[in-house]
Amino acid sequence: MKCKWPVNHVSISSTGKYRPCCAWEEQSDQPDVATNNIDDYLNSDFYKNLMIDMNANRFATGCAECKFDEESNVSGMLETGNTRYPDNEDFSVYDMEIKFGNICNAGCIMCSSYNSSLLEAENNSNPQLKEYRVFSNSVSVKWFEDDAKFKEIVKLAARGKRIRFTGGEPTVRGLLDEFLTQLVELNSDMRIQITSNGGNFNKRLQETLKRFREVYINVSIDGYGTANDFIRWPLTWNKIERNVDAMLQYDNITVNVETSLQAGSVDSLPQLIDWCKQRNIRWDANSVYKPAHLQPFLVNNEILEKAKALDNKKINKLLEYNSTQENYDVLRQRMLDYYDMLSSIRKIDWKECLNV
């Protein structure tokens, strides 16, 4: 089998569709959660065709990110799943990922309206951004507004060993706390994993998380200081730092930092890695492959060599890979044009935040 994710895991996308993993690119034939249960998903043509590809040891249509990882010779989702999961032939809920729509308090420059309501609003006000962003025209199915469906998904999640909440930004709505409040009554022993931008860590959520045995918070930080401020606008470094330090005060919470590595991230990587080491935080990075004009290899040679001096094999591989094989100068100019446009729209000067 090419990949073990589809027989051990189910994910709910930001548009309210069932999918095999969080890296899957949305397809038109995915069953929606609002009108289908887990058995409907497993008996759908979508899932059956997916398993035909997996059993034939080939990537399916939505596996673009893992294809890029394989081509760039880095360990990614495929290797993670094939190491973590048992060799099941039939589906079993080992773990699950849930998104409560695309509601988000950040407009990350590499993200899309698929995962950010802030970007969705910004795109509508600034149609010129369409040239520089990955766009999504999918209509969101708000399954979480139906109390019966909400309880159904809680019960499904409780069958697993772990559950992961991603976004959008899962911490900015009361839905995450409500889900966990119901879940803890069914299974408090499972592993809770939250992917967050670190911009919010309120007291109510903290009290709920204390009721679980094991909590992992993966904080998405793409640069140190002002670099992160520009990339993950309008979040601020000082607030993120305070929230991370608050997370570290809890014995049942483990904090990790994950970087979506792009050209704007590279210069401040040494500072970010040192910041993580000072707090005993595990750090990892995955490349931004799309939009192509934000890829990490587009930094200038001086910054490129400084990053390679970190002697991190994964970083070095990501810095060498071009997902489209387009011309360096053309892609780099598009990146700078995009930065200029964002500076004008958001009133934050990229030249005061980034060095590329």
Image (cartoon, grey):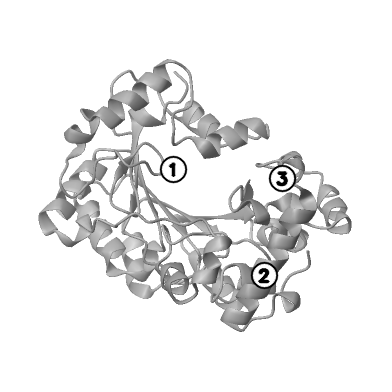
Of circles 2 and 3, the one toward us is 3
Identify the residue under disc 3.
326
* Residue found at the far top of this picture: 56
Identify the residue under disc 1.
25
Image coordinates for residue 267, horizontal then vertical, percent: 78, 61
Image coordinates for residue 237, horizontal then vertical, percent: 61, 74
Of circles 1 and 3, the one toward us is 3
Mark 1 and mark 3: span between their CA atoms? 22 Å
* Residue found at the far left of this picture: 148
In the rendered view, tell whether residue 234 sits above or below residue 19.
Answer: below
Q: Give the residue at x 54% y 70%.
A: 128
In the rendered view, tell whether residue 83 sits above or below residue 338.
Answer: above
Q: Secondary structure at mark 1?
A: loop
Q: Secondary structure at mark 2?
A: helix
Amino acid type assigned to the residue bearing label 2 in the image = Tyr
Residue 3 in which image quadrant: top left
> Can the viewer see residue 112 in this picture?
yes
Circle 3 crowding by C-alpha within 10 Å: few under 14, some 14–19, many from 20: few
First-in-chain label (1 vs 3): 1
Identify the residue under disc 2.
339
Amino acid type assigned to the residue bearing label 3 in the image = Glu
**Position of the C terminus by quadrant:** bottom right
